[in-house]
Image (tube, rainbow, N blue to C red):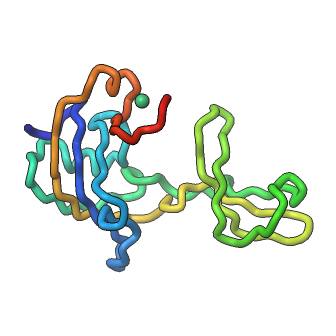
C-alpha cells in the first residue's frame, strides 16, 4: 500500500543537521507512526514520502520554510523571575506553554538572572536545514476515529 492522504504511515528515520550530526533517530525511541496529510510531521518530509511504498527508503533535505520555520527574534522575550516556577532554572531548560490561540508550544530558557528570565518560543529546530533518512515500514488505512482526531491511535495512546 502506498503512502497517501488519510493513511497511517510507520517510518524509521534519522534526522541530521547539515554537518551530519544526528539530531533525532527512531533507533532511540522506536518507529514513528503518523497520519499522512494532516501536518503531523514537517511538510517537506510529508511531500517526500507521498506515493512511496512499504520498504522504500527516502533521503531528503528540508529547508526551514518546509521544516520548522524560520527563526523570529520577536519570539524571544523576557518575563519576571517571579512568574516562573520555583527551583533552579538553567539555560537550555524547556517548558510547555500555550500561545494566544491556545496551541501547545515549547519555550526554551536562554538566559536567567535574579530579576528576569529570557525565553525563546522559536521551535528548537527553527531556521535549521534538516536532512532525513527514512524507511517506510508500514502503511495502513486510518480508522474513522483517527481521521476525526487528525492523529494516530496506538494501544498505548493516552485517553482523550
Ligand atoms: Zn485521538
- 28 lies left or right of 134: right
**Which quarter of the frame holds ligand 1?**
top left
- The answer to which quarter of the image holds residue 103 is top right
Which residue is depicted at the point 64% across and 60% down?
Answer: 94
Foreground pick, 4 / 159: 159
- The answer to which quarter of the image holds residue 114 is bottom right
Which residue is depicted at the point 79% across and 69% down?
Answer: 88
Where residue 62 appears, as percent x and y from the top left, is: 32, 58
- 123 lies left or right of 17: right
- 111 lies left or right of 38: right
Where residue 100 appears, as percent x and y from the top left, is: 68, 35
Where residue 131 appears, as percent x and y from the top left, is: 30, 66
| Residue 131 is at least partly visible in this image | no
| Residue 66 is at least partly visible in this image | yes
Which residue is depicted at the point 36% across and 59% down?
Answer: 63
Reply above or below: 155 against 76.
Answer: above
Where residue 125 appears, as percent x and y from the top left, is: 48, 61
Foreground pick, 8 / 113: 8
Amino acid at each position: 500500500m502506498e503512502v497517501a492522504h488519510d493513511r497511517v504511515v510507520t517510518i524509521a528515520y534519522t534526522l541530521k543537521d547539515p554537518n551530519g550530526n544526528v539530531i533525532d533517530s527512531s533507533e532511540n525511541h522506536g518507529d514513528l507512526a503518523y497520519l499522512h496529510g494532516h501536518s503531523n510531521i514537517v511538510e517537506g518530509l510529508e511531500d517526500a514520502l507521498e506515493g512511496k511504498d512499504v520498504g522504500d527508503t527516502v533521503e531528503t533535505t528540508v529547508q526551514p520554510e518546509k521544516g520548522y520555520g524560520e527563526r523570529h527574534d520577536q519570539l524571544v522575550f523576557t518575563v519576571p523571575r517571579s512568574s516562573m516556577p520555583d527551583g533552579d532554572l538553567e539555560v537550555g531548560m524547556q517548558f510547555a506553554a500555550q500561545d494566544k490561540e491556545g496551541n501547545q508550544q515549547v519555550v526554551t530558557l536562554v538566559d536567567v538572572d535574579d530579576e528576569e528570565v529570557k525565553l525563546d518560543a522559536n521551535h528548537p529546530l527553527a531556521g535549521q536545514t534538516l536532512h532525513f533518512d527514512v524507511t517506510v515500514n508500514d502503511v495502513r488505512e486510518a480508522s474513522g476515529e483517527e481521521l476525526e482526531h487528525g492523529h494516530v491511535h496506538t494501544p498505548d495512546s493516552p485517553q482523550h
